[in-house]
């Protein structure tokens, strides 16, 4: 291994904006992992090599690696080195998605376009499979939005919870995993809408209730249509328009 690990002809990952040097370094290590196409079990460069590559101290690198270990991306083996870890099943999509978002490979716009393709069908499938308990749970989740004194953050969490709940109602673990992988961006987009107050909470609640009514009635066509309408409005209110 040379002082600067190979980068397929590209420049070394750059330290970007962040709150601390260790956070910036952890993002740069993620970029290196993505660019090199490393797979679970692959050994990453040593602290010294990463420090030379990024132009930071070994102390910064050590803390950056600890952050990635805490997130479950890396595993340190005493006397052996640090390796890319195999993700748990519930993180197989969500953590790589988060890495891609953090490193600018995909954008919120990309996620919104994907949601526009996936979520209407999730809603339609939920309408075919929802139980009475599912409907009650979804209703309780979304009613938080119009509860007096609720913060924008609580509204955004409830909003995302409703969408994740629909995916859970499908009884399809792959669809659940896909929606979970979107949840960070979904929360940011929802919060942006609530903070900007570009659409009244009552109106957002009505959109969700229209979807829920179709799910309750076993109407997949209506559920699909109402979700499509809701996502279009979400794109407009968050200023992330679909093309």
Image: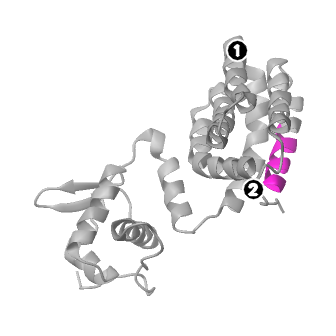
Does the magenta portion include 231?
yes
Q: Secondary structure at mark 1?
A: loop
Quarter holding the C terminus is bottom right
Tell which circle, 1 or 2, labels the residue nearer the N-terminal end.
Answer: 2
Vertical position of residue 135 compared to residue 189: above or below = above
Quarter holding the N terminus is bottom left
Vertical position of residue 12 compared to residue 85: above or below = below
Residue 131 badge:
1
Q: Is residue 7 left or right of residue 44?
A: right
Q: Residue at x 65, y 34 (%)?
A: 158
From which residue to which does the magenta span run? 227-237
Observer-nearest of 31 and 141: 141
Q: Position of residue 58 (x, y in %)?
A: 21, 73
Q: Residue at label 2?
A: 113
Residue 97 badge:
none
Outermost residue, top side: 132
Q: Position of residue 60 (x, y in %)?
A: 27, 70
Q: Position of residue 147 (x, y in %)?
A: 72, 27
Quarter occupied by residue 177: top right
How crowded pointer 2 is (Cα within 10 Å; few <14, some 14-19, many 20+) is rated as some
Q: Is residue 50 left or right of residue 174?
A: left
Vertical position of residue 57 compared to residue 103: above or below = below
Q: Residue at x 85, y 18 (%)?
A: 217
Q: Position of residue 70 (x, y in %)?
A: 32, 50
Q: Secondary structure at mark 2?
A: helix
Does the magenta portion include 195?
no
How crowded pointer 1 is (Cα within 10 Å; few <14, some 14-19, many 20+) is rated as some
Q: Is residue 107 left or right of residue 66?
A: right
| Image coloring type | one colour
Outermost residue, front side: 149
Observer-nearest of 81 and 58: 58
């Amino acid at each position: 291994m040379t002082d600067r690990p190979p980068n397929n002809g590209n420049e070394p990952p750059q330290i970007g904006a962040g709150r601390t040097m260790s956070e910036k370094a952890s993002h740069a290590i993620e970029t290196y992992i993505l660019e090199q196409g490393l797979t679970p079990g692959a050994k990453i460069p040593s602290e010294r090599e990463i420090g030379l590559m990024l132009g930071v101290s070994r102390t910064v690198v050590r803390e950056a690696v600890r952050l990635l270990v805490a997130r479950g991306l890396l595993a340190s083996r005493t006397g052996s080195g640090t390796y890319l870890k195999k993700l748990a099943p519930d993180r197989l999509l969500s953590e790589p998605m988060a890495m891609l978002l953090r490193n600018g490979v995909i954008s919120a716009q990309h996620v919104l376009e994907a949601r526009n393709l996936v979520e209407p069908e999730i809603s339609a499938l939920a309408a075919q499979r929802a139980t009475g308990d599912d409907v009650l749970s979804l209703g309780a989740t979304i009613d938080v939005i119009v509860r007096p004194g609720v913060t924008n953050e609580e509204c955004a969490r409830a909003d995302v919870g409703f969408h994740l709940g629909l995916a859970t109602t499908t009884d399809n673990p792959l669809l659940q995993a896909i929606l979970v992988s979107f949840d960070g961006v979904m929360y940011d987009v929802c919060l942006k809408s609530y903070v900007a107050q570009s659409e009244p909470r009552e109106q957002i609640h009505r959109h969700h209730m229209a979807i829920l009514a179709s799910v309750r009635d076993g109407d997949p066509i209506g559920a699909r249509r109402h979700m499509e309408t809701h996502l279009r409005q979400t794109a407009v209110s968050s200023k992330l328009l679909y093309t």
